[in-house]
């Protein structure tokens, strides 16, 4: 994850549209130092969990499809997590690798109990097929085999995911530099860690190496907290719900500055409290705060990465 950390830091020091406000970070860190709010993984109670390999298969399917819900105002991550849960509960082989390769758009809609086309439906179907095929080819069809081959290292898991599944290669070029965000690959490791409470399939000795997951909710929360500041043109674009092109400077800065700012926040809180704080914990807190705030306006980019 070093490449995520170093390349996002590069963006933050060369950014034109987004600024990281260190006074804002200091204020948040000061507030958090006495009581770092712990948010339970699955605080919403929407995920499938059976403490075994099927949960790993579920989480891989979930994070394969964990992106871009906003084009449909009524669609959210909750629909995905709970729809896949209900599907698996009624049919334990629904996420077998051979079946993943065959799902159509309408079948995926049915799984999510959704009556109209899903946002980026063709891409969702394509990515499901890609994961099913590669699971079959390299991991005996089992996501659990993939995780077992990582020697309890989240960094190895992310490297393996991005090597095997092109859909997880969340990187881009910014001002001539390659920038790595790896949102869905990292969140898969974090979901395993959270669901299995750091044991079994979630036992990663380097969980502290993971950064936050740069999506469209966390930057909006950081702006609200005064940690990120936007140039007025970007602020207006977001307020007007105008789409921001994937790979544009604005989009890369929003995501990369979020990762960088939370890394700085984490360092500061750790220094103030003398206790190690994890980016995963800060992410869950920020994200949970964001989704409970429906008036929060976020940037809109059509992307398969987040
Ligand atoms: N940074 C970060 N981004 C996250 C998540 C999660 C869900 N994680 C689950 C794991 C354990 C907990 O129980 C959570 O429920 C989804 N997202 C992103 O949010 C956006 C969806 O927003 P809306 O359209 O309002 O549903 C979309 O980009 C989605 O990819 C997270 O944890 N961190």
Image (cartoon, helix red, strand yellow):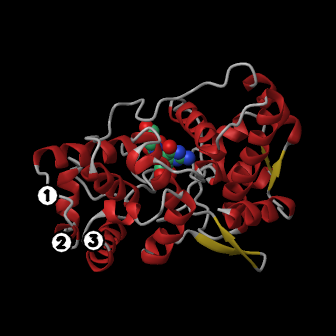
Residue 270 falls in which quadrant of the image?
top right
Q: Is residue 263 left or right of residue 99?
A: right
- Other-residue count near label 2 (Cα within 10 Å), few / some / many at <14 / 14–19 / ≥20: some
Q: Residue 291 placed where, x, y %?
A: 51, 35
How many angstroms separate mark 1 from mark 3 (CA)?
13 Å
Q: Residue 285 placed where, x, y %?
A: 58, 33
Q: In the image, what residue occupies the spot 28% across and 77% down? A: 133
Rendered view: 197 above or below 179: above
How many angstroms separate mark 3 from mark 2 (CA)?
6 Å
At numbered mark 3, what does the secondary structure look like: helix, strand or loop?
helix
- Other-residue count near label 1 (Cα within 10 Å), few / some / many at <14 / 14–19 / ≥20: some
Circle 3/circle 2 CB separation < 8 Å: yes
Residue 3 falls in which quadrant of the image?
bottom right
Residue 132 bears which disc, if any?
A: 3
Residue 93 bears which disc, if any?
A: 1
Q: In the image, what residue occupies the spot 44% across and 47% down? A: 202
Rendered view: 272 above or below 282: above
Rendered view: 65 above or below 296: below
* Residue bearing mark 2: 98
């Amino acid at each position: 994850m070093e490449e995520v950390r170093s390349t996002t830091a590069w963006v933050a020091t060369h950014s034109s549209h987004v600024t990281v406000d260190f006074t804002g970070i200091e204020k948040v860190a000061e507030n958090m130092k006495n009581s770092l709010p712990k948010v339970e993984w699955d605080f919403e109670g929407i995920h499938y969990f059976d403490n075994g390999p099927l949960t790993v298969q579920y989480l891989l399917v979930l994070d394969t499809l964990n992106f871009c819900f906003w084009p449909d105002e009524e669609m959210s991550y909750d629909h995905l997590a709970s729809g896949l849960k209900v599907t698996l509960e009624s049919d334990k082989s629904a996420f077998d690798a051979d079946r993943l390769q065959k799902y159509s758009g309408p079948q995926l809609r049915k799984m999510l109990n959704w009556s109209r086309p899903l946002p980026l439906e063709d891409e969702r179907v394509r990515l499901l097929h890609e994961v099913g095929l590669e699971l079959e080819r390299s991991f005996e069809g089992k996501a659990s085999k993939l995780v077992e081959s990582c020697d309890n290292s989240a960094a190895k898991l992310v490297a393996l995911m991005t090597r095997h599944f092109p859909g997880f290669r969340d990187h881009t070029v910014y001002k001539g530099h390659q920038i790595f965000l790896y949102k869905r690959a990292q969140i898969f490791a974090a979901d395993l860690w959270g669901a299995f409470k750091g044991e079994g399939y979630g036992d990663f000795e380097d969980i502290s190496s993971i950064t936050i997951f740069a999506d469209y909710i966390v930057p909006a929360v950081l702006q609200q907290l005064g940690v990120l500041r936007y140039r007025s043109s970007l602020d207006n674009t977001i307020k007007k719900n105008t789409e921001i092109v994937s790979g544009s400077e604005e989009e890369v800065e929003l995501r990369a500055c979020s990762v960088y700012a939370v890394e700085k926040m984490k360092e500061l809180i750790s220094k103030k409290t003398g206790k190690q704080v994890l980016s995963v914990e800060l992410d869950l807190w920020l994200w949970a705060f964001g989704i409970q705030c429906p008036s929060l306006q976020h940037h809109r980019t059509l992307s398969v990465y987040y």
